[in-house]
Amino acid sequence: MFSGLVRCADCGEKLYYCTSASFETRQDHFVCSTSRKKGKEVCDTHFIRAVVLEEGTLQHMRLVIQCVADYEDAFRKALGAKRSEEAKKELSAKKRTLQKSENRLAELDRLFKRIYEDMVNRKLSEARFQMLSDDYEQEQADLRAKIEMLENEDLAPLVDQKAIVEALKTNRIRKYVTDFPNSDVASQKNAIVIPHLGASTEESEDNCAVMAVKEVRDYLENGNIHNSVNYPNCDMGVCTSAMRVAIIHRNIPNMLAKFTSAFGELGINIERLTNVTRGEYGYVMVDLSHMADDAEIEKLRAIEGVLKVRVMK
């Protein structure tokens, strides 16, 4: 899960993920790549077990998710402020790029006139003039395309709102229908304002962020999956049994029979079970009548085709 993402706190290089067919899950670990390649003299051997890293990450996610749930209004405001600041920076960068492109376009016009005069005055050969002019024309064409793209990327409103207000007041425009008005336009008698249903409104982005937090929380606490890209939807609500086990497995024949047989051999009664699949993967949630210990869970992980086993409650 964390391969390529975890880095050494001292040297900043990646940590190698170490595993083996003979390892138990608790033995998988990460070590500093610098220490491995160049020795302890260059960087100490930093070591962390994968299960410890995963549990620490889950605890932090639970903390963040709980904060969002407890302070949803503050989260929405903070998210809106961050998005607004990022939008300002992006707009400023686009404006700088646009101005630079326009300046270069004007400069190319001057250069083209200069080399033409140099050719007429025989300071520049026709062949050299043709080569330079071809280069300049190609650069101008590229710049015009770039400028057009930048000008169409919300650097300015598509409609002059003040002009619309004036036109409505003087009846030059009889009716104006919009789903994105400002307060001046919305207050005009002949302006027809309809809801903006786009998925990129601030409200929809806030709602999506809150929904994502709630869905991640539901997965971490209850194992329920909603709106996943790779896995099927699966919801067994809140676990009311002694224990819930979630198993991600390959979608191959006889997997469910293997799971039920394994629990039977361990003497553990299944109270509820759900099995759903999508494409190459399947997902099983099992509510058990009593707690299973680590050794019993390891037996589930050892079943061929099992990719991940999570224990809740």
Image (tube, rainbow, N blue to C red):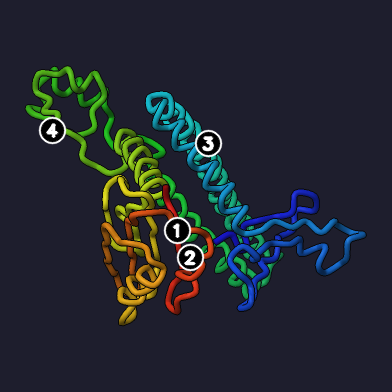
User: What kind of residue is marked 2?
Assistant: Glu
Looking at the image, is mark 3 or mark 1 earlier in the sequence? 3
Furthest toward the front, the residue is 267
- How far apart marks 2 and 3 lie (CA) works out to 54 Å
Q: Residue at x 81, y 63 (%)?
A: 34
The disc at residue 144 is: none
Between disc 3 and disc 1, the foreground one is 1
- Compare marks 2 and 4 and give the one earlier in the sequence: 4
- How far apart in space, not on screen, are marks 3 and 1 (Cα)? 53 Å
Secondary-structure class at tag 3: helix
**Mark nearer the viewer, 2 or 3:** 2
Give the label on residue 89, or none. Answer: 3
- Residue found 27% across the figure and 66% down from its top: 276
State if disc 2 and disc 1 touch (CB < 8 Å): yes
The reply to whether callout 3 and callout 1 are in contact (CB within 8 Å) is no
Spatial CA distance of label 4 from label 3 is 31 Å
Query: Residue 191, relative to residue 290: is it above or below?
Result: above
Please, what is the three-letter code of the amino acid marked with disc 1?
Ala
Quarter-wise, where is residue 245 in the image?
Answer: bottom left
Mark 3: few, some, or many residues within 10 Å (few <14, many ≥20)?
Answer: few
Read off the residue under disc 2: 296
Q: Which mark is residue 292?
A: 1
Which structural element holds mark 4?
strand
Q: Position of residue 47 (x, y in %)?
A: 74, 57
In the rendering, which numbered label is found on residue 177?
A: 4
- Of residues 14 and 117, the one nearer the viewer is 14
